[in-house]
Image (cartoon, rainbow, N blue to C red):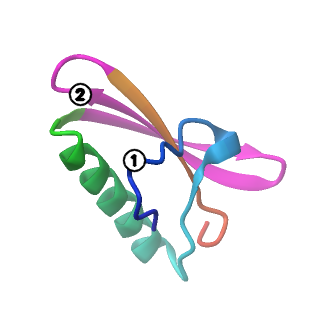
């Protein structure tokens, strides 16, 4: 999992955060742990989340659209081919 949250990653498919996990249960847990860590470090709460699976170039990505408590939205992409 990405440790340096000052490096902005995951804002597009081209710089998606890679989740390398042996199965979907652990992979999904890692995605949510990353989101929790990222947004708690921004001192902001997640109000709502929309999640979609995207397949591009035979690779699988999870796209999260996150609405913050101040009304702004963020989009985060995870490369999830390892466990999809």
- Residue at horizontal 35 percent and vertical 68 percent from the top: 29
Q: Main secondary structure of the magenta part?
A: strand
The quadrant of the picture occupied by the C terminus is bottom right
Residue 50 within the segment the image draws in magenta: yes
- Residue at horizontal 84 percent and vertical 48 percent from the top: 57
Q: How far is mark 2 from mark 1, CA to CA?
A: 18 Å
Judge whether 44 appears above or below 15 on screen: above
Residue 48 percent location from the top left of the image: 25, 33
Q: Which residues are magenta?
A: 48-72
Residue 43 percent location from the top left of the image: 15, 39
Q: Give yes or no for contact between labels 2 and 1 (Cβ–Cβ under 8 Å).
A: no
Residue 4 percent location from the top left of the image: 41, 58
Is residue 24 shown left or right of residue 35?
right
Residue 38 percent location from the top left of the image: 31, 49
The quadrant of the picture occupied by the N terminus is bottom left
- Residue at horizontal 33 percent and vertical 57 percent from the top: 32
Seen as rendered, the residue at the extreme bottom is 22
Is residue 62 shown left or right of residue 32?
right
Q: Nearer the viewer, residue 62 or 4?
A: 4
Q: Nearer the viewer, mark 2 or mark 1?
A: 1
Q: Secondary structure at mark 1?
A: loop
User: Circle 1 sits on which residue?
Assistant: 6
Seen as rendered, the residue at the extreme right is 57
How dense is the environment of label 1, judged by Cα within 10 Å: few (below 14), some, or many (20 and up)? Answer: few
Is residue 15 shown left or right of residue 33?
right
Q: Secondary structure at mark 2?
A: strand
User: Circle 2 sits on which residue?
Assistant: 68
């Amino acid at each position: 999992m990405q440790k340096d949250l000052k490096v902005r990653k995951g804002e597009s498919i081209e710089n998606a955060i890679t989740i390398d996990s042996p199965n979907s249960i652990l992979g999904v847990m890692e995605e949510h742990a990353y989101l929790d860590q990222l947004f708690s470090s921004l001192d902001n709460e997640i109000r709502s989340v929309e999640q979609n699976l995207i397949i591009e170039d035979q690779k699988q990505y999870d796209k999260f659209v996150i609405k913050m408590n101040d009304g702004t939205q963020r989009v985060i992409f995870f490369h999830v081919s390892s466990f999809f």
